[in-house]
Amino acid sequence: MANRITAGLDGSEADRACADWAAEEAELRGADLDLVHVEDRPLYAPFAAPLPESRRSWTEGLLARARQRLAREHPALAISTRRIDGLATADGLASAAADADLLVLGSRRLGPIAGFFVGSTGSDTIPRTETPVVLVRAAAESTYGSPGPAGGDGPVVVGVDLRSNCDRLFAFACEEAHRRSCPLVVVHGWSPPPMLAYAPTLDPGIEEEVADRLEATLRELLSSWERKYPRLLIDSRAVIGQPAVQILEAASGAALVVVGRRIRRSALGTHIGPLTHAVMHHATSPVAIVAHD
């Protein structure tokens, strides 16, 4: 890794939130910040065409203004800018993030019911890179008149599936909580299998017994991370209910929400699962998507 955070800017209202969060994260990590804009146009015949000067000037102005503002607010931060031509936007962003530690993208608010608009660029970019991707929400109007980053000063919240390999998720979430000196909340949501649908009537303690076993499994998985981060406060929860709903409830006011996506080498099949999709579109805090086997 190049110890670099890459932030993708597209000129939308979410750019400021995206750039601000990326700059703060770069300072936390002691990393450089790379601001990138991708021009989606072919370089080769029969569709190749030179970039209009007006569009080139707009792109250069977009990157220059963002860099100048961040340089004033983060004078010790090393900031570079890049314009990438000739690739589809998602491919260009994935290429820019290939040797970065993190790719940061913006998403805009649609409303309390509709949630956030991740858009085709974000949804297409995430499956194309194994670099963690953070989606930063544009909150309501900030004191400067532009949308600032949403989120809070609460814990880092990570949603896990005990049937999957959680090592990458735990590693990322623990390090983020450690950097922020905040607690880590680990959530595993589960629903009783159909065969146990009538068990609570026959044995009121059956669900509690299953929950206790799941919590014990979760604590066992976390034991090595507690030893690695002895000062980190870790709150593990195995709760009954739809996993996405439980994660979203725990994530209210969170500094960061972390979810995973399974790496699929085939072009076929789902690349972003329903849980991650729901959290991406409805969590108000920044959401990190971490690829795992």
Image: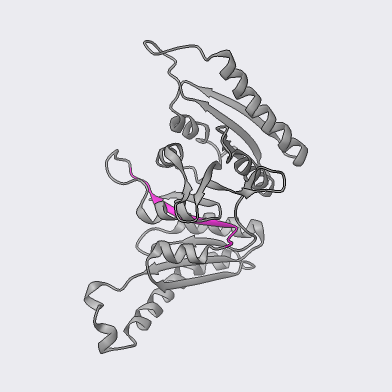
Instruction: Say above or below: 244 vs 53.
Output: below
Where residue 110 appears, as percent x and y from the top left, is 49, 48
Depth order, front residue of 189/221: 189
The residue located at (53%, 36%) in the rendering is: 99
122 sits to left or right of 52: left
Question: Is residue 220 magenta-colored?
Answer: no
Q: Residue furthest left?
A: 195
Locate the N terminus by quadrant: top right
Work out whether residue 129 can be spotted.
no
Whether residue 263 is visible = yes
State which region is magenta.
Answer: 253-264
Question: In the image, what residue occupies the spot 59% across and 16% down?
Answer: 54
Q: Nearer the viewer, residue 202 or 111?
A: 111
Measuring from the top left, give residue 2's x and y in whole percent.
Answer: 59, 37
- Residue 252 in the image: x percent, y percent? 55, 63
Residue 252 in the image: above or below residue 114: below
Task: State how the image is colored.
Answer: one colour
Question: Where is 98 relative to 144, above or below?
Answer: above
Percent x, y for residue 176? 59, 55
